[in-house]
């Protein structure tokens, strides 16, 4: 167990939308309470997130009232959305740690630790004992992200797919069942619809990587700190959140048919088969600009900006690693 001489406050932030049934959420809460009851440790709190970004504001206020020399370990209970909120709440705070207890639809970041590790991250006792590892964080404009930041057709595809899923979730049992199982299909459908937008299909971007310009007409500009997104998709297999570098792919606009042919290769890390269509870059600070406002997907959250700076913050968060082998990337 963690040493009691080290004052640690455990804060569980739960996203209720990650649980389709109230009893499932309550079962997780009961498991948390039962664990701390057995350990005779009352130094924990449970907060139910009330709305998007609620945790981002709540965490600093909670940390402010803690005694000095207290470590705050924040557990994001849900999917990538609540992990995003909690990351933006802890980044920049002293003596904080971030943990993820995956109950979301995709759990993209946790997938990078290995396809069979989800159950370990759901184990409260294992999370309580697990060590922390320093991970890099991406500063994407005014937000922080652990996994990726995508601009262009792909971001618009996620936006469109998200709208379809929201409507399906409001439907009957069959639509809800299909919604949970057709995530990748809906993304591809969204990508096809986005390509009908000529302004996005072949748009001119001004891209600067560590001071070096790479301008051109691109379909998508994607920056990765981790490997996975969209559930099981991994465009850059060896993107790691602890290597001190950002990996970027720029896909040249070549027309709808050409892009649809390239898409499955890109999504599974085989983009090198299209050297004339895909540009690979690495850097620590990336500036992206265009004539029209940018559509941005940052760890599955959609934003709109006139221009964007993505900057690497090395070892900016202490992440609780409940896995067996650490972060493995797209080959895990």
Image (cartoon, rainbow, N blue to C red):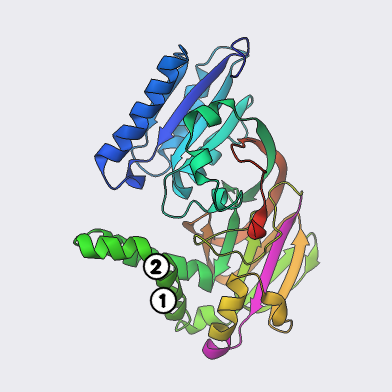
Q: Which residue is mark 2?
A: 161
Label tally? 2
Q: Is residue 264 left or right of residue 242?
A: left
Which of the 4 image quadrants contains residue 248?
bottom right
The structure residue drawn at horizontal position 45% and vertical position 68%, both measured from the top left corner, is 184
* Residue 251 is one of the magenta-drawn residues: yes
Q: CA distance from mark 2 to mark 1?
A: 7 Å
Q: Which residue is mark 1?
A: 189
When the figure is inspected, residue 116 is found, relative to residue 266, above or below; the finding is: above
Q: Is residue 271 left or right of residue 186?
A: right
The quarter of the image holding the C terminus is: bottom right
Q: From where the camera sits, is residue 118 visible?
A: yes
Few, some or many residues within 10 Å of mark 2 (<14, 14–19, 20+)? many
The quarter of the image holding the N terminus is: top right
Few, some or many residues within 10 Å of mark 1 (<14, 14–19, 20+)? some
When the figure is inspected, residue 202 is found, relative to residue 283, above or below; the finding is: below
The structure residue drawn at horizontal position 72% and vertical position 39%, both measured from the top left corner, is 315
Span colored in magenta: 244-258
Where is residue 126? Give x, y as percent. 54, 30
Where is residue 236? Give x, y as percent. 67, 64
Are circles 2 and 1 on residues that touch, CB within 8 Å? yes
Q: Is residue 310 left or right of residue 192?
A: right
């Amino acid at each position: 167990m963690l040493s009691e001489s080290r004052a640690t406050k455990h804060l569980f932030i739960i996203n209720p939308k990650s649980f389709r049934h109230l009893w499932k959420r309550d079962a997780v809460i009961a498991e948390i309470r039962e664990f701390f009851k057995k350990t005779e440790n009352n130094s924990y709190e449970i907060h139910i997130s009330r709305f998007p970004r609620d945790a981002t504001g709540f965490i600093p206020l909670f940390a402010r009232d803690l005694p000095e020399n207290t470590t705050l370990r924040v557990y994001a209970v849900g999917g990538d959305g609540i992990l995003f909120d909690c990351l933006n709440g802890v980044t920049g705070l002293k003596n904080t740690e971030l943990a993820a207890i995956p109950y979301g639809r995709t759990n993209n970041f946790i997938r990078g630790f290995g396809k069979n590790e989800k159950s370990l991250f759901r184990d409260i006792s294992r999370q309580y004992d697990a060590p922390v590892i320093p991970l890099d964080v991406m500063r994407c404009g005014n937000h922080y992200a652990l996994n990726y930041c995508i601009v262009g057709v792909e971001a618009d595809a996620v936006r469109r797919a998200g709208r379809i899923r929201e409507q399906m979730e409001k439907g009957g049992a069959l639509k809800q069942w299909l919604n949970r199982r057709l995530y990748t299909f809906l993304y591809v459908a969204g990508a096809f619809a986005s390509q009908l937008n000529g302004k996005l299909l072949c748009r001119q971007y001004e891209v600067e990587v560590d001071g070096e310009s790479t301008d051109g007409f691109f379909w998508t500009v994607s920056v990765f700190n981790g490997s996975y997104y969209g559930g099981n998709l991994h465009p850059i297999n060896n993107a790691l959140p602890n290597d001190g570098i950002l990996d970027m792919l720029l896909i040249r606009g070549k027309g709808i048919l050409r892009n649809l042919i390239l898409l499955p290769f890109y999504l599974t890390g085989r983009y090198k088969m299209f050297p004339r269509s895909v540009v690979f870059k690495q850097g620590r600070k990336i500036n992206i600009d265009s004539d029209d406002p940018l559509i941005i997907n940052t760890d599955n959250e959609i934003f709109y900006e006139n221009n964007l700076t993505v900057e690497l913050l090395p070892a900016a968060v202490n992440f609780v690693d409940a896995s067996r082998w650490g972060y493995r990337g797209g080959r895990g």
